[in-house]
Image (cartoon, rainbow, N blue to C red):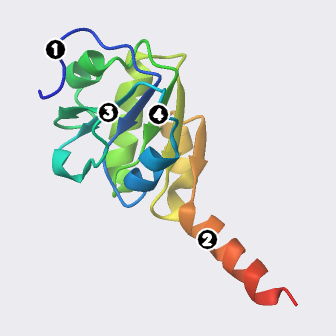
Amino acid sequence: MEGIDAPVEPDVLILGTGDLTTALLEALDDDLTVVVVTPEPDRIVRDDVTVVTGDPSDDRLLSAAGVESCSVVVVATETDRFDALAILSARDLAPDVRIVAAATNRENVTKLERAGADSVISPASIGSRILVDSALKS
């Protein structure tokens, strides 16, 4: 477990790394305490982020990363089935935390909500709407 020397109380806990993780980290304010749980620590490009190396659905790692005390959990692996496991674990450990997930396949939005996510975003659906709006503007 890299990065955890003492108990952590993150503002934002990110579970997994995927295509959205870099953009997400860039969008978050520098004054927020951010912890990322990922099996791929080399994909994290921000130096001020604490990285916990391992499975984002591992209860022990989630507890060490501060899931019980964080303000929000963002689930962003590259596979919806891994997202579902991470959501189930986070919800079990922190029943009241806000969980936001990114669905890789828009068909899985409802399933990730049933797993316990408060909000599920489909980047493909949002991107397609933006493309259509841009294409149809005069």
Q: Are marks 4 and 3 in contact (CB under 8 Å)?
A: yes
Please tell me in which quadrant of the rendered image residue 47 appears. top left
Q: Earlier in the sequence, mark 1 or mark 4?
A: 1
Indicate the amino acid at tag 1: Asp
Mark 2 or 3, closer to the camera:
3
Question: Measured from the top left, where is residue 87 in percent x and y?
Answer: 41, 35
- Which residue in the structure is indicated by mark 1? 5
* Left or right: where 11 falls relative to 86: right
- How many residues crowd around disc 1 within 10 Å: few (fewer than 14), some, or many (20 or more)? few
- How many residues crowd around disc 3 within 10 Å: few (fewer than 14), some, or many (20 or more)? few
Q: CA distance from mark 4 to mark 2?
A: 26 Å
Q: CA distance from mark 1 to mark 3?
A: 15 Å
Indicate the amino acid at tag 4: Asp
Q: Earlier in the sequence, mark 1 or mark 2?
A: 1
- How many residues crowd around disc 4 within 10 Å: few (fewer than 14), some, or many (20 or more)? few
Circle 4 — which element?
A: loop
Q: Which mark, residue 127?
A: 2
* Left or right: where 66 falls relative to 28: left
Mark 1 or 4, closer to the camera:
4
What residue lies at 47% left-to-right and 37% top-to-bottom? 115
- Which residue in the structure is indicated by mark 3? 48
What residue lies at 42% left-to-right and 45% top-to-bottom? 25
Q: CA distance from mark 4 to mark 3?
A: 8 Å
Question: Measured from the top left, where is residue 40 in percent x and y?
Answer: 18, 49
Circle 1 — which element?
A: loop
What residue lies at 28% left-to-right and 49% top-to-bottom? 45
Question: Measured from the top left, where is residue 121 in percent x and y?
Answer: 58, 52
Circle 2 — which element?
A: helix
- Which residue in the structure is indicated by mark 4? 30
Q: Are marks 1 and 3 in contact (CB under 8 Å)?
A: no
Indicate the amino acid at tag 2: Gly
